[in-house]
């Protein structure tokens, strides 16, 4: 690692000011992606701005029709939350599948969403549930937030403070993980609302995406059989040493069926 | 920067660059070489320590995270406090041959103690799931799982005494 200055602000405006005033500085939440990136020298920021001393960024609140999770809430807390288990069990299940136990203790929801790794789990949950990303300056709908490979709608100096999830009628997550990294080779989050079904896929392409034909079929009939015959196009899907695009396309259908099963169970 | 924390029960202050990893700080500055660095990419778990009671990978933890915290390393595991006695989980690993080369063992023990502390009635499935972030290239895990189950029972028994 190259040396860097370390700032531990205790107010969000101060953190935002540091982030805009120090060129190329980075925010660090749990560090589960950033620290390995620094170690490999894929990034060498002059300063890190640690969010762990900011108040009010940790915790889970029940707002009735929605559940709000603070950006610095670690995965282990979401996975073990009685509230999330009761209201959106699919989201608690997703959190329990991220990385390994040590990673879930440090890694945070805000960090995962801001990083937008193409194989991370949370982006599928956030897009699948149609959540709202609350930042230091505004609120952003999930549909407009994820912009492909590690890209998001966040502006320079903008900090995620919370994610607000609408409570669905049913929801489920299924992932086929790469065994070494435990990232999603393909992960699918399915959520059923009164207005229809949303299906969000991670791991398969350069960023999380929805599958409208599956959403329509599941809105008609929320059962794995409804989408068993729907194949997705391999255009834009990832081919790498772990899996070819056609295998990933096949897995999208299989994982969607399993996610619907999980939602129904 | 000055970093003050409690290390294995003792107040400790070090002056370290923010870009110091806790695994490096322990091994190279504080001469606590029981914490091993295996992969150095947060996959293998040989470097697991307890930060405020929770198991974390010290190769993926920056030294500033220690400030004000409580850190327990493999050197701080013991049976009766202040004694030279092994921790019940260590005894279980010895008794059930839960290691061969021993490189992964410090991380396995730290993860195992955390697992058994969090859930005293561990099932085999809990242990296998809980050890997902700890890699052993010798044993095939069979005896590690047996050891952790036995160690959890011994920890419960010691608590009841």
Image (spheres, rainbow, N blue to C red):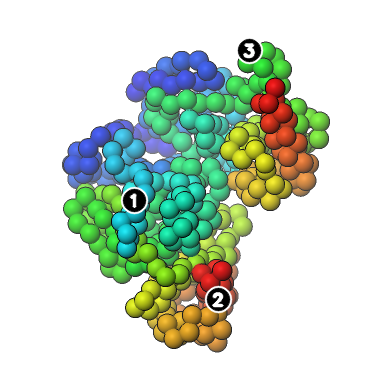
Q: Is residue A49 visible?
A: no
Residue A134 x/y as whole percent? 26, 55
Mark 3 Cα shell of 10 Å, populated few (<14), some (14-19), many (≥20): few
Dot 2 and dot 1 residues touching (CB under 8 Å): no
Q: Which residue is mark 2?
A: A257
Q: Residue beneath label 1, please?
A: A61
The chain containing the residue under callout 3 comes to B
- In this rendering, the answer to whether B103 lies above or below B27 is below
Q: Badge 1 sits on which subunit?
A: A
Give the class, few, some or many, for how many residues have Cα within 10 Å of label 1's Cα (few <14, many ≥20).
some
| Badge 1 element | strand
Residue at (66%, 33%) from the top-left corner? B109
Task: Name the chain letter of the residue that bears numbered label 2.
Answer: A
- Please give left or right for residue B37 compared with residue A211 in the image: right
Considering the numbered disc 3 on the image, is that residue within a helix, a strand or a loop? loop
Residue at 45% of width from left, 46% of height from top? A77
């Amino acid at each position: 690692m190259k040396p860097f200055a370390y700032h531990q602000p205790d107010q969000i405006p101060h953190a935002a000011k540091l982030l805009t005033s120090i060129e190329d500085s980075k925010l660090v939440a749990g560090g589960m992606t950033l620290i390995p990136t620094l170690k490999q020298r894929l990034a060498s920021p002059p300063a890190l701005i640690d969010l762990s001393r900011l108040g009010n960024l940790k915790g889970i609140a029940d707002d009735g029709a929605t559940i709000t999770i603070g950006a610095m809430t670690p995965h282990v807390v979401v996975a073990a939350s009685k509230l999330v288990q009761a209201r959106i069990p699919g989201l608690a299940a997703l959190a329990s599948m991220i990385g390994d136990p040590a990673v879930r203790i440090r890694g945070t929801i805000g960090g995962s969403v801001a990083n937008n790794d193409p194989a991370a789990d949370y982006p599928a949950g956030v897009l699948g549930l149609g959540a709202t990303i609350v930042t230091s300056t505004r609120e952003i709908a999930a549909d407009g937030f994820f912009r492909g490979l590690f890209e998001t709608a966040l502006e320079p100096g903008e900090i995620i403070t919370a994610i607000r999830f609408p409570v669905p009628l049913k929801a489920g997550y299924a992932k086929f993980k790469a065994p070494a990294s435990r990232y999603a080779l393909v992960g699918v989050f399915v959520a059923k609302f009164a207005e229809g079904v949303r299906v969000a896929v991670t791991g398969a392409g350069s960023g999380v995406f929805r599958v409208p034909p599956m959403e329509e079929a599941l809105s008609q009939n929320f059962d794995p059989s409804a989408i068993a015959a729907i194949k997705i196009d391999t255009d834009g899907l990832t081919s790498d040493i772990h899996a070819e695009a056609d295998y990933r396309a096949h897995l999208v259908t299989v994982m969607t069926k399993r996610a619907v099963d999980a939602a129904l169970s | 920067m000055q970093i003050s924390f409690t290390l294995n029960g003792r107040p400790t202050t070090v002056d370290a660059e923010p870009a110091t990893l806790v695994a490096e700080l322990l091994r190279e500055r504080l001469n606590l070489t029981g914490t091993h660095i295996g992969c150095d990419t947060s996959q293998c778990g040989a470097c697991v320590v307890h930060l405020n009671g929770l198991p974390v990978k010290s190769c993926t933890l920056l030294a500033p995270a220690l400030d004000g915290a409580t850190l327990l390393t493999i050197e701080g595991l013991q049976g009766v406090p202040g004694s030279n006695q092994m921790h019940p989980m260590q005894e279980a690993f010895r008794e059930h041959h839960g290691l061969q080369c021993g490189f992964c063992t410090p991380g396995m023990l730290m993860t195992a103690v955390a697992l058994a502390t969090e859930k005293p009635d561990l099932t085999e499935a809990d242990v296998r799931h809980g050890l997902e972030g700890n890699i052993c290239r010798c044993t095939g895990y069979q005896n590690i799982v047996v050891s952790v189950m036995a160690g959890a029972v011994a920890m419960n028994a010691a608590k009841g005494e």
